[in-house]
Image: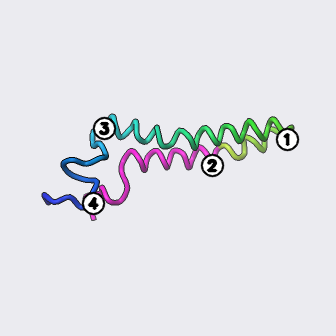
Amino acid sequence: MDTPIAPDEGEGSPIPTDEDSDRWRATKYTLPFVALGIFDVVLVIGWGLNPIWGFAILPPILFISVLTWIAFKNGFITEREDY
């Protein structure tokens, strides 16, 4: 399997393939979503609503952010070798 499956694989790829850069890329792309979620919690509490509403929406935001980080770190379906 010498030929790349997708244009972003192989030699000269614009996407780095080392482990540290994958973690950094995942963090860089996920951080804005986490920041928006925390800003949303602060905004809800700042409006004077019951704090439970702010913290009720925080777990889904963090869950989706973790899924996003895992997807960016491990690659999407084009980088899988077992299909």
Disc 4 marks which residue? 6
> Residue 60's mark?
2
For residue 60, side relative to residue 8 (left or right): right
Q: Is disc 1 surrounded by few (<14), some (14 to 19) or many (20+) residues within 10 Å?
A: few
Residue with the mark numbered 3: 19
Q: What residue span does the magenta drawing correspond to?
A: 59-83
Instruction: Please state which of the two labelled residues, at mark 4 or mark 3, is closer to the viewer.
Output: 4
For the point 84% across and 39% down, the residue is: 47
> Mark 3 and mark 1: span between their CA atoms?
43 Å
Amino acid type shown at disc 4: Ala
Q: Secondary structure at mark 4?
A: loop
Which residue reaches farthest bottom? Answer: 83
Nearest to viewer (mark 2 / mark 3): 3
Q: Quadrant of residue 38?
A: top right
Compared to residue 71, the image places residue 55 above or below, namely: above
Residue 19: x %, y % from top left: 30, 38
In what element is the residue under mark 2?
A: helix
CB within 8 Å, label 2 to label 3: no
Bin the neighbour count of mark 4 within 10 Å (Cα to Cα): few under 14, some 14-19, many 20 and up: few
Amino acid type of the residue that numbered disc 2 sits on in the rendered structure: Pro
Q: Secondary structure at mark 3?
A: helix
In which image quadrant can residue 37 be found? Answer: top right
Name which residue lies at 81% across and 35% down: 46
